[in-house]
């Protein structure tokens, strides 16, 4: 467990940031009157997420590996962080859509129908279960990609 404690810590940090981001989205109206643009607006979460990955991988290299780590090791660390985020995903989505924005799904369904989506399709797409799956499925590949890209930037060899 000690070997991956840095990844667990940063995965948890990113998960807390995701909950705070959900609060920000709600306060900016992205879950209410601007819900039809949610998909576009929500992509901006990539900026803080990538910053977290950068600092996590830098810490991993500097503290756990005494500043010597190649890009492959950093890519694996990124994948582990993504896996931790995916594991926290059900809790993050539950808190966001049950406590912070309980009306999000009904608003999203209405907006989907207004854009021409069939009601049944909208009702099956805009659910907590769907949000959890989407979040978890994005987390691991994002970790691999971020780990690889930042690994190439941060790698230091003997």
Image (cartoon, helix red, strand yellow):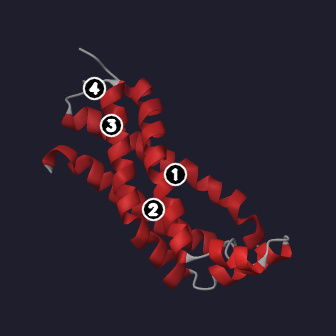
| Pointer 3 or 4: first along the chain | 4
| Pointer 4 or 1: first along the chain | 1
Q: Which residue is drawn at 56% across and 48% down?
A: 47
Give 38 or 56, whichever is nearer the viewer. 38
Q: Do the residues labelled 3 and 1 touch (CB within 8 Å)?
A: no
Q: Which residue is drawn at 50% across and 45% down?
A: 50
Q: Residue at x 69, y 61 (%)?
A: 39
Horizontal and vertical percent for residue 32?
71, 79
Q: Which residue is drawn at 58% across and 76% down?
A: 127
Q: In which quarter of the image is residue 15?
A: bottom left
The residue to which callout 1 is attached is 48
Rounded to the nearest angstrom, the CA distance separating label 3 from label 4 is 11 Å
The residue to which callout 2 is attached is 17
The residue to which callout 3 is attached is 76
Rounded to the nearest angstrom, the CA distance separating label 3 from label 2 is 22 Å
Give the quarter of the figure containing the C terminus: top left
Horizontal and vertical percent for residue 63?
22, 37
The residue to which callout 4 is attached is 69
Q: Please rate how many residues cluster around mark 4, counting C-alpha atoms within 10 Å: few if below 14, some from 14 to 19, many from 20.
A: many
């Amino acid at each position: 467990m000690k070997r991956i404690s840095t990844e667990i810590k940063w995965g948890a940090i990113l998960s807390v940031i995701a909950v705070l981001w959900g609060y920000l989205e709600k306060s900016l109206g992205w879950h209410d009157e601007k819900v039809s643009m949610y998909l576009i607006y929500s992509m901006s979460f990539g900026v803080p997420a990538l910053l977290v990955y950068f600092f996590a991988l830098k810490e991993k290299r500097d503290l756990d590996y005494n500043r010597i780590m190649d890009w492959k090791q950093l890519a694996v660390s990124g994948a582990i962080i993504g896996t931790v985020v995916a594991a926290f995903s059900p809790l993050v989505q539950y808190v966001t859509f049950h406590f912070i924005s309980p009306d999000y799904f009904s608003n999203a369904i209405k907006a989907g129908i207004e854009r021409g989506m069939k009601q049944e399709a909208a009702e099956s797409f805009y659910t907590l279960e769907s949000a959890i799956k989407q979040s978890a499925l994005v987390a691991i590949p994002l970790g691999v990609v971020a780990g690889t890209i930042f690994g190439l930037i941060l790698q230091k060899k003997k």
